[in-house]
Amino acid sequence: MASIAVRRVYDDGKGAEGAVFLVDRVWPRGVRKEDLALDGWLRDVAPSTELRRWFGHRPERFGAFAERYRRELDEHPEAVRLLLEAARKGPVTLLYSARDTEHNQAVVLRDHLLNRLGG
């Protein structure tokens, strides 16, 4: 079974395993690019700007956000291809910058990937 972890980018990468990808559309504030050991910054896998702004990290909108984001992912399968390939080879860590560790795009993306991988 695939191992896909989600971690806040501000946690200094502690616990990051395997291939590490930033999955935010915009670079996290206060983080220098040279300070992150990334295998990739996948802007195109992040929610659209319109969806991200609509959600606004409001927990009461998370269910609708997740549904709409999964639709976006389904409409752009090439965006997740690299993540699926990496997860088939070994552990993957998805980095995100949101404060809320339960209601964010990385959680939805992880579940989407695991579903696609059959796990």
Image (spheres, rainbow, N blue to C red):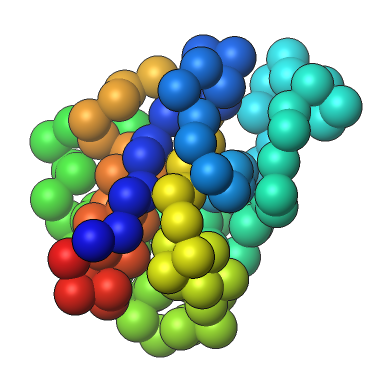
- Say which quadrant the C terminus sits in: bottom left
Q: Which residue is drawn at 44% across and 62% down?
A: 87
Residue name at image x 31 percent, y 59 percent: 2
Q: Residue at x 55, y 83 (%)?
A: 78
Q: Quadrant of residue 115?
A: bottom left
Viewer-proximal residue among 41 and 58: 41
- Comparing 4 with 10, the one in front is 4
x and y, in percent, of residue 36 in the image: 73, 28
Task: Write down the quadrant of residue 99 in the picture.
Answer: top left
Q: Is residue 25 above or below residue 36?
A: below
In the rendered image of this protein, does residue 112 appear above or below residue 9? below
Residue 22 at x, y percent in the picture: 60, 43
- When the figure is inspected, residue 99 is found, relative to residue 83, above or below; the finding is above
| Quadrant of the image containing the N terminus | bottom left
Residue appearing at x 86%, y 27% in the figure: 34
Residue 65 lies, in percent from the top left, at: 25, 54
Question: Is residue 79 shown above or below 23?
Answer: below
Count all numbered tags in the image, as a single digit.
0
Judging depth in this view, the residue of 67 and 87 nearest the camera is 87
Residue 47 shows in this picture? no
Q: Nearer the viewer, residue 12 or 85?
A: 85
Asked whether residue 109 appears in the rendered view, the answer is yes
